[in-house]
Amino acid sequence: MPKRKRATRRKSANSQRAVAAANVNPADYEIEDSPTREHPRWLADFARDAVWPFIDSHRKAATAALARWLDCKAAHDERLRQLANLDVEKRRLACSPETEDMAREVGNKIKQRVRLITSYNTPPLDLPLPPPADRTLPPDDCLVALLAVNDETRDPSQRIGPTDSSLYLALCGKVRELKEPHLPALRAMLTMTVPKPPTRIAGLALAAGGFVFGERVYDLSDRPRDMLKVLLNSRHRRCTVSFLREAMKIDEESVTFPEQVVKDAAKALRAALKQAASAVGYQCDNPLPSTGKGADLTYSLAIP
């Protein structure tokens, strides 16, 4: 009995596409690998010794500056995002077996994106890296530039800036264009970013007929001065209203409302301390804050 021939099953279109896709070699399309993080010795040393510790100490200020910088350059960021999308579409076309259909689809998208990109009416993009030689940069630009150096030279696990912002990624790419002659300008950025702390001033101390603050003498007498003396000599420079009343020798036999006398003295002392702080440039909204109510009412000195 002759053997029956087995009918050959025709592969489905999906199977054929899967085989074709499996046979695609990405190397045939010259897709570049991710760039390695190799930097010249001078940049690596500068980043490790100066930039990384600086960013670690001023991380909050750096992230706030980056948010302001990106907000001001939102139109540029959108333009770069559109350009990045075009590049993605081109790579899709190169790796797709259905080249003819995909070419028409991507061609239409490219025309739409080009019209969109060219419609932006924004000034030329000005990145803070490499640092310009003919002008100084605003503090926010300096912080953002240093943040980009940090993120580009440091381990990815310690990256701070966003990975979904085309503009910030473009700035990080500029780090690879830095040359050793840029080093003095990069070092200068470290001093132009965060405001310097105020100069240390001489703290509060009693003086005859008043007090001293910032090496200046101010008049103060009677109960406000008595209150300052008690606070300066108390632990943590904090006292309850009851303790102040006793230390200032205010009793019910001499006044009708002892606690109100303490409050009035505190009001006068607060005004004198605020005037003294303002005179030496010391920022303090309330040099004599109070907390609690009734028997728990507590006054404290908030200036050194």
Image (cartoon, rainbow, N blue to C red):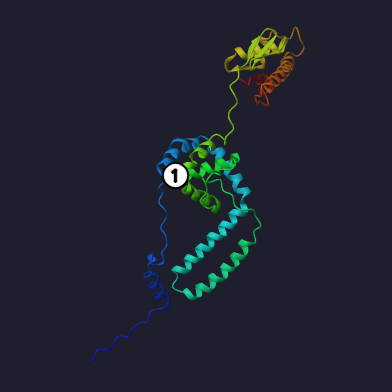
Name the residue furthest bottom.
1
What is the x, y in percent for residue 70? 59, 48
In this figure, which residue is indicated by the disc labeled 1? 153
User: Residue drawn 56% across and 67% down?
Assistant: 110
In the displayed structure, would residue 225 be above or below residue 289? above
State the image coordinates of residue 38 (x, y, percent, origin top left).
Answer: 40, 48
* Residue closer to the observer: 250 or 170: 170
Pick the front one: 246 or 108:
108
The answer to whether residue 10 is left or right of residue 183 is left
Is label 1 in a helix, a strand or a loop?
A: helix
Instruction: Assess disc 1: are there few (<14), some (14-19) or many (≥20) residues with their C-alpha within 10 Å of its C-alpha.
Output: many
Q: Amino acid at mark 1?
A: Thr
- Location of residue 279 in the rendering, given as x and y in whole percent from the top left corner: 69, 21
Q: Position of residue 232 (x, y in %)?
A: 62, 14
The residue depicted at 41 percent of the width and 64 percent of the height is 30
Report the front residue among 227 and 118.
Answer: 118
